[in-house]
Image (cartoon, rainbow, N blue to C red):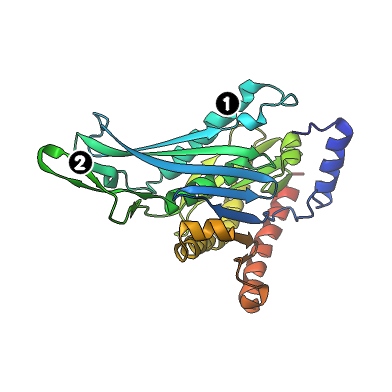
Amino acid sequence: MQVLSQNESDFVLSGLENEIRLDGRKLMDSRNIKVIFGNNVGEIEVLIGDTHIITKTTAEIIQPKQEKPNEGSLKFNVDLSSMQDEQQPNNVNIKKYSNEIQKLLEKIIKGSKAIDMESLCIVTNKRVWSINVDSSVVSNGGNLIDAIYLSVIISLLHFRKPYVSVEQQSNIKIHTEKNPQPLSIHHIPIPFTFAFFKKSTLLVSDPLVLEEQIMEGRLTISVNIYNDVCNIHKPGGAPIKLELINKLVEVCLNKIKQMTDFVRQILKECNKHSINQIKEESKIITLNFPQIVSASQTSNQIPSNKMEEEEEQYKVSKEEIKNLLESRN
């Protein structure tokens, strides 16, 4: 990871003050997203700009916890070892950041009851499914939280557990000849991360790694398509006015339908092809804000009047945020 000098930090901050970002985006714009399906169900690669994440979901049969005999297990593991290079300040921070992301994944997915844990039970007090989700960072271009989470939720939606039956004396038989079963997922919460600068008088959405080096704090808001705020995560840093948080929640709610539609679209696209076809064709589906474009679509297939309406709604929210930031001066 490149470490910024003082002059470089001043240059990045000066650009943000003039609403100019290193990759040409506006302050509240998000980067393009690419999703690549692997050789097996639950194997997903997500690329958001230069941030590259690989996630794999697996399942095994275990004994349940005594305090929850009719619930399965859902575990997350985040590997940030690729960030442990000679330019990293210290490895302790990497371990701390990894634990933070893992706990946040649990709070968003398990805390909002997005997954039905009781549906993972096979035999009460004897056997349940344990779902293990492993994510690895290939490259860090910034905003790891959103990128890792997106790869995790798509992996869980794409995953299928083997079909099993319970025979005499609670013996469990796995039927490989039958179609595997998807996980029971009630809703799809999605996080959006914002970085703050200059005592919270300047903010950006989906920060780059160089922007993260000079930010004074960050805020992650998780919402779903039903307009529920599933989680708000702020790990210290500069204080933020409650009114600003409320406006950022509105921004997230404006984006959530597009993101949810995108997730559902790529899964629908994936179901049209077998895993081997996806591998051979190197199937990639791309999301461009504020419009959703798949590998087989062109921009003129999206109704322009709908896109203009969504863009106008988003602009209003950004103008209100700008007024709130100026009121802090």
Q: Quadrant of the C terminus?
A: top right
- Residue 53, given in percent of the width and then of the height, sits at 59, 43
- Residue 80, given in percent of the width and then of the height, sits at 60, 32
- Asked if residue 152 is positioned above or below residue 264 in the image, the reply reads above
* Frontmost residue, 247 versus 39: 39
The disc at residue 281 is none
Q: Residue at x 47, y 55 (%)?
A: 224
**Dot 1 lies on which element?**
helix
* Frontmost residue, 47 versus 97: 47
Instruction: Look at mark 1 in the image and give the residue it sits on.
Output: 96
Q: Residue at x 45, y 49 (%)?
A: 40
Q: Amino acid at mark 1?
A: Lys
Residue 87 shows in the view: yes
Tell me the mark number nearer the camera, choosing from 1 and 2.
2
Q: Residue at x 32, y 53 (%)?
A: 181
- Residue 218, given in percent of the width and then of the height, sits at 64, 39
* Frontmost residue, 129 versus 232: 129
Q: Quadrant of the N terminus?
A: top right
User: Mark 1 Cα within 10 Å, few/some/many (few <14, many 20+)?
Assistant: few
Instruction: Tell me if 13 is positioned left or right of 186 in this view.
Output: right
- Residue 299, given in percent of the width and then of the height, sits at 67, 73
Q: Residue at x 54, y 55 (%)?
A: 279
Instruction: Look at mark 2 in the image and give the residue it sits on.
Output: 172
Q: CA distance from mark 1 to mark 2?
A: 39 Å
Q: Amino acid at mark 2?
A: Ile
Mark 1 or mark 2, which has the lower sequence index? 1
- Asked if residue 244 is positioned above or below residue 140 in the image, the reply reads below
